[in-house]
């Protein structure tokens, strides 16, 4: 063998080994299934493709959990993991599906809304592939996803995303972002089909309220808040004031901009009778000037660079040595969701929703989110679903 | 899978072929040899539908 081919063989071997190691990790991540134990409140489990034929057999199809009360009442849909790199949303949805009991009205929960995004990673940003939540029965492993759907499921991206139906020009990446593709269309790109299916749920099931759960950087002004259009504003404001007064945490209200299209809090209200709300809890992991993107940073939100910026008053949320732990974020989401239900029910007694067994902020912070996750090993197999 | 998506997979296969061809033809520069292989990695992972 010539010297040239000896060198080439060594290079080939090195690249092949690296590609194989990375490839196995990426493959395993994309196909890793997170078990969810459907609680006693779950009455029906549908698929998103039941509401849009074009999703059938694709990686974008996902579970839709119905929790119907004995008494007729209002309906609320909870959408989590629109952005799968904001995992407090999925944990809140898991908590609801595994624990909530609806006495009156109906809950509809989609824990993994952008299923393709939940199986995507951001290797270039050094994202961890998984994170563990400690529970009384051991650690529960979750996938860490990405903001956008995987290009394996929707490719190529256009140079510019022309939003449907407003024709507003958005970033090319946003064609894979399920918080830019609302209200969607049945014949559009895959992520427009995802949002269209959710719109169909709201229209067909006559859903009263939609809650889209997110997380946002501490350096971004739209964080730690409820985003609401005019039609949802009174309920959002009352919920914000009530959690502040009764539970002691801030969650201010931001108006949904009328000129920025494709967002859930904008389009749901414009294209259905549903009242949309989008909640944001701070997630320091997503801020740019942080240390390494580790699992610890994701879970406890402690970062020395953000602490330094906080002292210079450059953050939009209070921030100290305690960081912004996951339990606090999930607790906020639970309390805000329950308070939105409470405020809506007061104004619409004929469409009231009554729910039990969902903890509020202080309880989640005290016991930790893991306390509310059930052991799939001990659960009836018929009640286990995979996200 | 849409027609355009399939065309992009065909393009990726073509690019992998071109990179391997250049790798084989490169006689002197070790940097370039390695570069051709590294550039091919994301295309290979995409064609294999891994990443």
Image (tube, grey):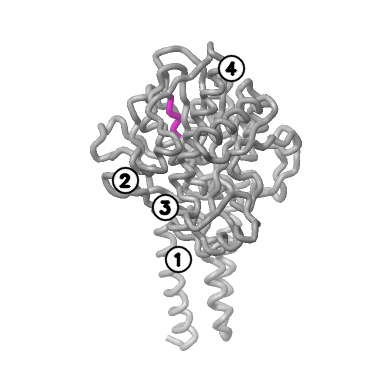
Residue wearing tag 3: A29
Residue wearing tag 2: A135
Q: Earlier in the sequence, mark 1 or mark 2?
A: 1
Marks 1/4: CA–CA distance: 58 Å
| Marks 3 & 1, CB-CB < 8 Å contact | no
x then y, percent, for residue A296: 43, 58
Is disc 1 in the same subunit as disc 2? Answer: yes
Q: Earlier in the sequence, mark 3 or mark 4?
A: 3
Residue wearing tag 4: A347
Place residue A365 in its image quadrant: top left
> Which numbered marker is on residue A276?
none
What kind of element bears circle 3?
A: helix
- Indicate whether residue A138 is drawn in magenta: no
Above or below: residue A154 compared with residue A188: below
x then y, percent, for residue B15: 59, 63
Within-10-Å neighbours for mark 4: few <14, some 14–19, many 20+: few
Is disc 2 in the same subunit as disc 3? Answer: yes
Above or below: residue A363 compared with residue A44: below
Which of discs 1 and 2 lies nearer the camera? The answer is 2
Residue wearing tag 1: A19
């Amino acid at each position: 063998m010539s010297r040239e081919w000896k060198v080439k063989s060594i290079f080939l071997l090195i690249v092949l080994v690296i590609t194989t190691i990375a490839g196995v990790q990426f493959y395993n991540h994309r196909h890793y299934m997170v078990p969810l134990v459907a609680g006693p409140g779950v009455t029906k489990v549908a698929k998103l493709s039941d509401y849009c034929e074009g999703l059938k057999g694709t990686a974008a199809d996902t579970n839709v959990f119905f929790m119907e009360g004995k008494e007729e009442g209002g309906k609320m849909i909870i959408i989590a993991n629109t952005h799968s790199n904001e995992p407090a949303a999925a944990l809140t949805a898991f908590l609801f599906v595994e624990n909530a009991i609806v006495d009156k009205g109906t809950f509809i929960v989609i824990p993994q809304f952008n299923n393709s995004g939940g199986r995507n990673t951001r290797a270039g940003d050094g994202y961890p592939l998984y994170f563990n939540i400690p529970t009384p029965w051991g650690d529960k492993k979750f996938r860490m996803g990405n903001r956008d759907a995987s290009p394996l499921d929707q490719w190529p991206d256009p140079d510019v995303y022309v939003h449907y139906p407003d024709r507003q020009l958005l970033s090319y990446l946003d064609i894979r972002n399920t918080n830019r593709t609302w209200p969607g269309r049945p014949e559009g790109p895959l992520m427009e089909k995802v949002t269209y299916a959710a719109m169909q749920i709201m229209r067909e099931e006559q859903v009263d309220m939609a809650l889209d759960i997110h997380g946002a950087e501490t350096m971004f002004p739209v964080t730690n808040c409820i985003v609401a259009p005019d039609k949802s504003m009174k309920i959002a404001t009352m919920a914000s004031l009530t959690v502040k007064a009764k539970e002691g945490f801030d969650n201010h209200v931001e108006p949904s901009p009328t000129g920025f299209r494709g967002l859930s809090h904008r389009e749901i209200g414009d294209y259905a009778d549903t009242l949309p709300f989008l909640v944001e809890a701070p997630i320091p992991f997503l801020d740019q000037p942080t240390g390494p993107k580790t699992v610890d940073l994701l879970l406890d939100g402690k970062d020395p660079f953000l602490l330094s910026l906080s002292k210079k008053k450059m953050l939009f949320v209070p921030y100290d040595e305690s960081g912004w732990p996951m339990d606090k974020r999930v607790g906020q989401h639970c309390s805000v969701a329950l308070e939105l239900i409470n405020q809506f029910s007061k104004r619409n007694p004929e469409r009231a929703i009554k729910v039990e067994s969902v903890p509020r902020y202080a309880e989640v912070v005290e016991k930790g989110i893991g306390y509310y996750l059930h052991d799939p090993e001990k659960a009836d197999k018929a009640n286990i679903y995979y996200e | 899978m849409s027609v355009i998506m399939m065309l992009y997979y065909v393009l990726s296969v073509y690019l992998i072929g071109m990179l391997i061809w250049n790798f084989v033809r490169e006689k002197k520069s070790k940097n370039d040899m390695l570069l051709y292989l590294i550039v091919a990695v994301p295309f290979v992972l995409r064609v294999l539908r891994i990443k």
